[in-house]
Amino acid sequence: MRPEFTGPEVDSFYHLRDVEMTHRKCRGLSCFAAQGFDPATWSDALSQWPPVYCLGKCYISPATTENLEEPHVEIRCKDPIILHGVEDTTMLSIGGYLDGAGYLGLRRALNHDPEYVIAEVERSRLRGRGGAGFPAGKKWRAVYNTPGHEKFIVANADEGDHGSYIDRLLMERTPHRLLEAMAIAGYGVGAAKGVIYLRKEYPVAETRLRQAIEEAVECGWLGNGIGGTDFNFEVEIVIGQGSYVCGEETSLLNSIEHQRPVVRARPPFPTAQGLFGKPTLVNNVETLCSVPWILLYGGDSYAARGFSNSRGTKAVSLNSMFNNPGLYEVDFGVSLRAILEDIGGGLKNGDFKAVIVGGPLAGFVHPSEFDTLFGFEEMHAIGASIGHGGIVAFDQGTDFVQLLAHVFDFGAIESCGKCTPCRLGTRRAQALFSKASGKALDAQERQELRETLDALSFTSLCGHGSGLAVLANSVFSKFPEEVKSCLA
Amino acid sequence: MAAVASEVELVNISINGVALQVPKGELIVESVKRLGLEIPIFCYHPRMKPVGMCRMCLVEVGFPGPDGNIRKMPKPQAGCTLPASEGMAIFTDTEQIHRDRKGVLEFLLVNHPLDCPICDRGGECPLQNNTLFYGPSTSRFLELKRHLPKAFPLSKYVTLDLERCIQCGRCVRFTEEISGDSQLAFRFRGASMQPSTFELTDFESKFSGNVIEICPVGALTNREYRFRARPWDLETKPAICTVCSNGCNIWFDHRAGRMVRTNGRTNEAINEEWTCDRGKFGHEFYNDSNRVKHVMVRNGDALVESDWPTAYDAIRMAFAEGGNRVAALTGPSNSNEDLYLLKKLFQTRFNSNNFDSRWTTYLPTAEDDLQKKMGVSMVQNTIADFESMSKVFIFGSSLADELPILFLRVRKGWFNNGNKVVVASDKPTDADSFAAEVLRYRTGTESTLASGLLALAVEKGLAQVPDATRQSLSKYTAEHVSDETGVSVDALHRAVELVAGAGIITSHGIFNTSQPQDTVETLAGLAMTTNGSFNCYALGANDQGALDMGVVPFGGGMDTHSILQGCIDGTVKALWLVGCDPFELHPDYDLVEKALENVHFLVVMADHQNGAVPFASVLLPETAPAEQDGTFTNMERRVQRMPQVLAAKGSAKPAWRVFSELAIRIQPETPPFGPADCMKEIAESIPSYAVADYANLGGEGVLIR
């Protein structure tokens, strides 16, 4: 699928191309928050080049590639949907997965026509778990409705947002669920090929997925004539080379095509012209992994869970600042406090200063907002998000100005460079925040910082630049005391 | 106009409160121009796809709400990627927009070295201009600027200064979208992103010079122009490129009598705004030290400086015998006026038809004329026609080398409209890269391939021909043609579908192949019988003009080869070379050498020293094309006027004036007072040129049909 040819214009974009994933120390936001647990590791992480942003081990932050400790996984809702089988390794092989009703969702789909599959997903009211929360059914319907004999299913497994290790665990423990989901999607929208775009930071997931693909092909759940029907579906894995923006779906498609992974203008949306210009369904791993359950038990059963416009259940991952770090499946509609305090057990060191839900480009949540109910709209109303459900907590010792400098450094390193404000403004803002963490900015610099953030927010081409401004603005409005040194 | 407008769906929009109608989907960056407004831009270029990278063209956008009030979108939008839709309200002049533009410009200036005083672009730089109009007045960045390679020689013609680059991607997109050689690409990401050659090799492109002009800063500069002038020192005059027959419109920039650089000048009918490297960098000879500046007359072994009256007297005596004893050969860049008066001089004063403007191996005779034989013209399409032509067949021409600007237009038709292009050539050509089918034939089998395609078209019912023709084509079975030419039977079958009804492009280069007349007639026939069109384009700057002016020996004179042979065997006593070097133009070097050695009297009229000068009896300084007023007819038969840009060198005169002065010395008459008068005379004897009156020759020039 990937053209053999590689050139410096593409290769030079990625920072992990020639890097072995050993002896790497994570520089992600969770590890920033937890730097006090192991200052030496953190200081190594800061001096290491190229940097690695989020190894998906936020439960042991500051994390390294050498620390192989596995996270605690627990179901904290009535019946598990997404984490069923993730608590242990019983569903790793196809035998264990089949014992746990594996591939029955696909079986059920194949017994019906594709329209049935699309309708079930629509009825489930499943929303995208990658961050945007777009109704999955709408996307599936759009690809289904686009004429074309060649279509693609792309699983976005570039879980780059700091604080989340949900997709990693789903792929490492229940790899077959992802394959089953992709096959269902392929059958539904009329695609015969699936691509998993997996980040290089997850080598174990790669091994397990490859193993699973082999088993599934052997057992006839992938390949030609699946389940005795004339439905064919194959899955290929493409490994990322280190670039945060590849998590954005159009960049991701460019990366698979071996183009420079810069954001594509939309429209046309990938559902109309995606991979190689063909109609393409791009879904996040967790979104896809909800699908076999939906097919097995029905969209209505799924929609019966959750509340408001947030249906089903959600996996959340808590970082090492919590007393009980780990991966939990929760019902939508519980309060954020219930997740942070009842499940997470509060912080190891004193009280919360703030949390971030769903990656560094979402807003901060102030402790006074912890009673907000866990749901897409509800979180949005307080200037935060569900994102992908990765939760990073910050204790009282956190220096917000340093934090902002750190995040903007990350933003500048990971900017694709296509648009002016993000390419140059992120670095400028980082310089000002760094300066402010030493001594207070003067009036002119404060003014400049304000204007830089405004320009980032209003003029950026995609969410990378404006998301960084959102983050900074949420600190400015919710924690003015913490950023006195740079607040205009 | 009304009829055209009614076909386009219009939408109502307002710009800064002014209501107007624009075509649906028109980009807002273009719509604002309708009100005489301007949105500052860097990355946007009207001839390339918008990318919305630089964020300079931001506008505020709103739509009327249910209460009739405009509701603005929360964030400004890039005008270059925003298509007009019904009810859209655009604001280009709000406080928010001014703040955003200032912000973007400030970012761009963070890294920009601001070395304007030593930058070639200073004075004509979009970054400078936009900063002046929309940017901050002072810089808040006091830190050290980034340092990157400066003055990196990207190619023979282009220098790259990475410190000045603002990463707009225009150059990268040019090589992807326009020239198609994809020689430039971005490397790295974020703030480290920089344009460079794709494989880190030399920037090898036939159109590299264009990136210098579209660069909105001084990152890409012209190696030949570097540090030679500031824009405000230059005098800029419109001109026509005389390097090939496309007739591109250019600007000649000169300073104190020296040609300093050429830039593309917009002519939508011809070059749009592009130039090829051969043209853009092909005008250095104006400044050469070996320009011919003075009249020289042979005295024994040496040429000694003389004057025009002496030269005229010598020529009169030598050419007095006239008839078949005298002859003239012309070069590719004489103006129509020069050529017409040369013919008139020979016919009326020397009673001779011995003149020829052609230098190919095969020289078609009067009887070979397609118009006479088949009733069709050798030139049926304009350059612009190929943009909308769904099928194009390039035969036997490396188009990017022979007619570069036509190549760009054919490529544009493929890139924008998906036109199908078939290339038949004996060697690889640049057009192969986008051709739907490439027919690589063995050299010398051109005519067989053409016949084979016609035969196959007849067989498939794509072409209707008389029975006699059908008979004569019977031996050209696909298998036979495949054996002869080396083109596979399958390829022939695939190609014929695309070739039938196509616009065929070939060039006078075909006359250097074997059996060219057959090839030309068969291709013309293929076009005729399949409702296609046929073109055999001239290659020299004014070769088409020379044919139109009748500088061919069809009145019973000798052709180029016979004239040179005549010089050797003594039948031709006096030869006049008008702006041509036969050693460069004629395929047979030895023949030329013998001819020039043996001819009794040789007039060499040239603008710079050439291989024939050592043989000259009289050397006449001729003005170069941009040093005289005159018209040129390009390959599509478009007549364009090039007004005089530079002063004549030394005592050089335009050729037409020399012919006229000599003519009145032989037999008095009222001479033409200038090139405009010459054109009036031309119109009288060549009626199709009546439209080319100097009063009409503005704008895009006039097409002769």
Image (cartoon, coloured by chain):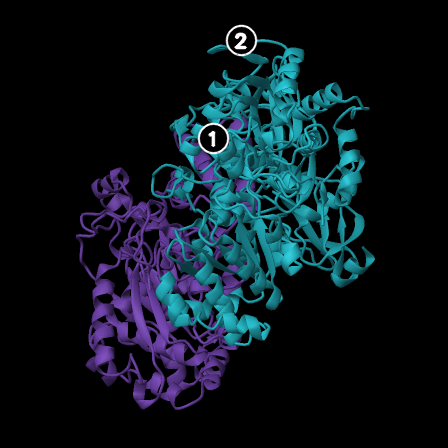
Residues A32 and B17: in front is: B17
Badge 1 element? helix
In the rendered view of the protein, which quadrant contains the C terminus of chain A? top right
Residue depicted at x 25% and y 69%: A209
Asked if the residue under mark 1 is in contact with the one under mark 2, i.e. CB atoms within 8 Å, the reply is no
Chain under numbered label 1 = B
Kindly report which numbered mark, 2 or 1, lies closer to the viewer in this rendering. 1
Residue A93 showing in the rendered view: yes
Residue B502 sits in which quadrant?
bottom right
Among the two numbered marks 2 and 1 on one chain, the one whose residue lies closer to the N terminus: 2
Residue type at tag 1: Ile
Residues B566 and B336: in front is: B566
Residue A155 sits in which quadrant?
bottom left
> Which chain can be seen in cyan?
B
Residue under numbered circle 1: B568
Badge 2 element? strand
- 10 Å crowding of disc 1: few (<14), some (14-19), many (20+): many
Residue A132 showing in the rendered view: no
Q: Which mark is residue B304?
A: 2
Q: Count up the numbered dots.
A: 2
Residues B298 and B492: in front is: B298
Query: As displayed, is residue A248 above or below residue B538?
Result: below
Q: Picture coordinates of residue A112 (x, y %)?
A: 42, 90
A167 vs A298, left or right, is left
Query: As displayed, is residue A348 above or below residue B8?
Result: above
Residue type at tag 2: Val
> Which chain can be seen in purple?
A
Query: As displayed, is residue A321 above or below residue B299?
Result: below
Residue depicted at x 27% and y 43%: A36
Q: CA distance from mark 2 to mark 1?
A: 26 Å
